[in-house]
Image (cartoon, rainbow, N blue to C red):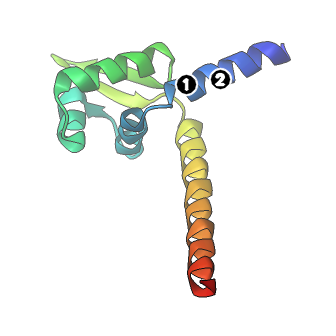
Amino acid sequence: MRDKISELHAEICKTLGSAVRIEILNLLQDREKTVGELAEGLELKQANVSQHLALLRQRQVVATRKEGTSIYYRVSNPKIILACRLMREVLIEQLKETQKLATVAAKIR
């Protein structure tokens, strides 16, 4: 069972291994949106965004709701957003530490 969970974890990490898909999740964190709204927010073509959404949907990271001719996308589990936020906080902390080290190194020279 542990091996299966590790494999699934790795697959989710691969799925989230795209800056565009991370940005899609950031746009979806507050409310559901259509492909058009996401494409506009990302300044990308709808076809490109649709490809990313298809993968996110296949991996059950996002879910959909159809209303008339529109399909609305939302994050399937709010814990996904929490995990992304935590990783972003870690990265920000790392960048701040790197900047501090660079500042200290520049003063030493």
Q: Is residue 32 left or right of residue 97?
A: left
Q: Which residue is mark 1?
A: 14
Q: Quadrant of residue 29?
A: top left
Choose between 32 and 43: the one closer to the eye. 43
Asked if the residue under mark 1 is in contact with the one under mark 2, i.e. CB atoms within 8 Å, the reply is yes
What type is the residue that disc 1 sits on?
A: Lys
> What residue is at 57 percent from the left and 73 percent from the top?
102
Q: Which residue is mark 2?
A: 10
So how many labels did they put on this image? Answer: 2
> What residue is at 75 percent from the left and 19 percent from the top?
5
Residue at the extreme front: 109
Q: Position of residue 43 (x, y in %)?
A: 18, 40
What type is the residue that disc 2 sits on?
A: Ala
Quarter of the image where the C terminus is located: bottom right
Q: Quadrant of residue 70?
A: top left
Choose between 33 and 39: the one closer to the eye. 39
> What residue is at 34 percent from the left and 43 percent from the top?
27
Quarter of the image where the N terminus is located: top right
Q: Is residue 83 left or right of residue 5?
A: left
Q: Is residue 47 left or right of residue 16?
A: left
Q: Position of residue 56 (x, y in %)?
A: 43, 22
